[in-house]
Image (cartoon, rainbow, N blue to C red):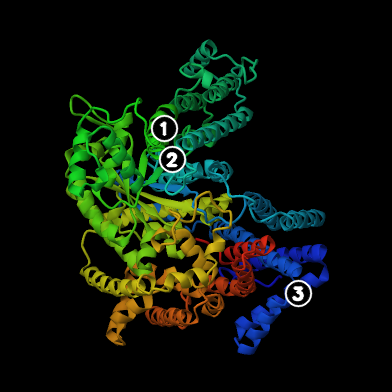
Amino acid sequence: MTELTVAAGKSNTNNLLRRDIRFLGNILGEVLVHQGGNELLDIVEKIREASKSLRAVFLPELHEEFKGMINSLEPEIRHQVIRAFAIYFQLVNIAEQNHRIRRKRDYERSAGEAVQTGSIEAAVKDLKEQGFSFSEAQEILEGMSLELVMTAHPTEAMRRAILDIHKRIADDVMQLDNPTLTFREREQLREKLLNEVITLWQTDELRDRKPTVLDEVRNGMYYFHETLFHVLPEVYQELERCLSKYYPEHLWHVPTYLRFGSWIGGDRDGNPSVTANVTWETLRMQRKLAIREYQGQLSELFKYLSFSTTIVDVTDELLASIQRDRLQVTLKKTPQWNNEKEPYRIKLTYMTEKLHNVLDDSKKDTSERYADVNGLIEDLKIIDRSLRHHYADYVADTHIKKLIRMVELFGFHTATLDIRQHSKEHENAMTEVLANMNIVSNYAELNEDEKVALLERLLNDPRPLTSPYQEYSESTTECLNVYRTVFQAQKEFGKHCITSYLISMTEAASDILEVMVFAKEVGLFRKEADGTVVCTLQSVPLFETIDDLHAAPGIMRRLFNMPIYRQSVSAMNDLQEIMLGYSDSNKDGGVVTANWELRVALKQITAAAKEFGVKLKFFHGRGGALGRGGMPLNRSILVQPPETIGGGIKITEQGEVISSRYSLKGIAYRSLETATSALITSAIQAKLRTNHNPEEDKWDEIIAGISEISLKKYQDLVFREPDFLKFFKESTPLGEVGELNIGSRPSKRKNSDRFEDLRAIPWVFAWTQSRYLFPAWYAAGTGLYTYYQGKEENLKVLQEMYQNSTFFKSLIDTLQFALIKADLVIAKEYAKMCNDAEAKERILGQIEQEFLLTKEMILKITGVTEILDTNPGLQESIKQRNPYVDPLSYLQVQLLLELRAIREAGQDDPVLLREVLLTINGIAAGLRNTG
């Protein structure tokens, strides 16, 4: 298993990637022989060669022969073959990730003074060359904002134990580039990697139970500890270095523009396991992580701050702060430093003790702990000023400045936690509360105007709606407890620990006002006697379906027109956060319409907010997969209309995207660097865009027409074909995906078989596994052809749009990526699991016809002869991967047929189910996509 290569970049670095893959493939081959004998390796190699031959030249007889080879495998061998291919992809993915880091380093080493495309320096250089002054550059920086929000959406198929092994293998493989290694050291490195791959082979890839919410919290915090606490300050340092280089006459301290948030432990939409108590424990865990991180940093500082007052003159300010600490703080957890000539080390011992005491509940409201993060920052600044006083500037810049930035970014809460809940839950709770108070007997039955009028009156009324002496249902009690928890959390962990309450399936203004009324009950929102409004928790609407996107501008206008609501926005710095859902809009209307309607909504909501002097922060709910808006982070910023990012951007990071972007420091840095570059570039474009291009109006009209036709085509099949849902369930591993223990959240919002209640993640995951990738391309071809109509002049317009419209180019390139990953030959094998032959032929025929039409239109628009000729490196990577994924797909179909037959007979086979789940993991690793 040694031949997978990726043809991209310079041949020299490419050879190194081939070397790594061959090296790891050979090691895996040794492990196969060691664990299963030569017979196992021979079978794997035979299947691999046959799959490659079939991909090279598809012949029906070869296809049948290949399937016969797969179907004839004995269960024990079959199990090992599945694992061999799955682990091979894990190793290839490691090699490719390392290669990304290598290519960046190789570029920086060979480029000299040249500036890398997409780097922070490239953006700052452009800023200077475009003639932006210092004050204009400063204004851009102060207006930039990007928050990346980790979610626990169940799309990471790998266990934490497997990811840990991957990390060790990645670190070891990187050592292969070390030219100073001796022959013996290389042999030892090989032996170490051999042991790691054996460990990987003998470690269960599958979880034996669903993770708890707190398990997911720990998994998310792993990336903060492993990379983000250290990489994020480095990104800021690089931005300040570049600004100082191009604007040398000024001192720069970049305002906080890039930070991380989290949903893990706060997202209760459809997940009954996320309770108020779990949210509180999440915040405690996040604080503990931050404190431990800072204690580790202070311990490191101890090594460097050995400055002696026999040689240097420290500031009186530092000495006075030490004296205060001695009077106020008793050293119990931290050993006392007895060398009075080393004041910095004495200061660090007291700082460490005060951090210990932050975690000690018995030390609340005492001077022995930091009351908030500002106290720690001030102590660090005292050290910083003293170091500069005796000309230890380098030490201050290298160590203290970075730590101050770290504390500014992560505080005592690590990441701002968002709360999310379904709008229906708030309506149900409000109905019960208002009935108990005899305000209205059935709030849920009121029309929208009546609801809004009532909620507005309640917001202006200072009297409470709830009483500790009243009893409520369990669901209403939990709903109220969430707000009480947020109020206590802001007092305990700081106001930045939770600031946003997201409302899933927001369909009306009342959905947003309900959350505000509940916030008023606990003091998160209040109107003072003088009319001043205080608000520390913002209601954030989540517009998800196509209809909701259409309604969104009107809903926000209605709210901004309401004085009490507008005052609440003023209390949040005139900034309103709004979330747009890519997953459900795609599931509702297809890829073309979802992307178009999201763009229209962005512009229209921005225009509505501008009428009322409100800045908007758009929260883009993207997934990792193509059908859920997945794309590189920098591109997801650049495709936004420049005028819509003035108030900042939030983007979800979820599933396998988190591990692929943030498990290795080099990749994490590059991802955040290119995101920063994209933010600056977008700001430049927004500033320079003074004249509206009339061509864009024409293009928008064309895309709107394409979207309208595409929507009808998509919904004709998905919503109006009576057998479609049955076809989907039977011809994909949807049910079995739900048995893969990859998340604490159920795959459905309700115990229902309705399409509307199916979550977008399993929808996309199942289509990806079966190689259709249906949500990522279906109905695009019909929409595009309807405009083209075989007319050369219309094709030229589409080609011009591809060259000059950022949105249209991104859409077409996303379609290319989906089409090259999809494989209808294999998808037809999955379709054989559909029990209704007539429905299968009818639906499969429509899908295949649309696939061919979409491919034809993409080739015409891009002007190439093969999909992704515009990106040959990526094209070759996917082409080379596909033959290795194919055996897992054929094996999965066979196993699903066997398992379903057994289950239809009223029995079950845990071993067979395990093999199915192993193929799911393997295909996810091979395609580098789940949901």
Marks 2, 1: nearer the viewer: 1
Q: Is residue 5 visible?
A: no
Q: CA distance from mark 3 to mark 1?
A: 58 Å
Query: Helix, strand, or loop for circle 2?
Result: strand
Query: Helix, strand, or loop for circle 1?
Result: helix
Q: Tell whether 390 sits left or right of 578.
A: right
Depth check: give the residue in front, 141 or 95: 95
Residue designated by label 3? 43
Q: Amino acid at mark 1?
A: Thr
Name the spot of residue 846 as percent of width and height, x first: 42, 80
Depth check: give the residue in front, 120 or 573: 573
Q: Where, quadrant-wise, is the N terminus in this rendering?
A: bottom right
| Residue drawn at the location 62% of the way across and 65% of the way down | 906
| Residue drawn at the location 65% of the way across and 80% of the way down | 67
| Residue drawn at the location 61% of the way across and 88% of the way down | 59
**Label pair 3/1, CB-CB below 8 angstroms:** no
Name the spot of residue 35 as percent of width and height, x first: 80, 62
Q: Which mark is residue 11?
A: none
Residue designated by label 2? 417
Of all residues shown, which one is farthest toward the front?
Answer: 906
Query: Helix, strand, or loop for circle 3?
Result: helix
Name the spot of residue 399 as percent of width and height, x first: 54, 34
Residue designated by label 1? 485
Residue 477 versus residue 770 in the image, above or below: above
Q: Residues within 10 Å of mark 2 (few under 14, many from 20)?
A: many
In the figure, residue 806 lies in which quadrant?
bottom left
Q: CA distance from mark 3 to mark 2?
A: 50 Å
Q: Earlier in the sequence, mark 3 or mark 1?
A: 3
Name the spot of residue 808 as percent of width and height, x first: 34, 69
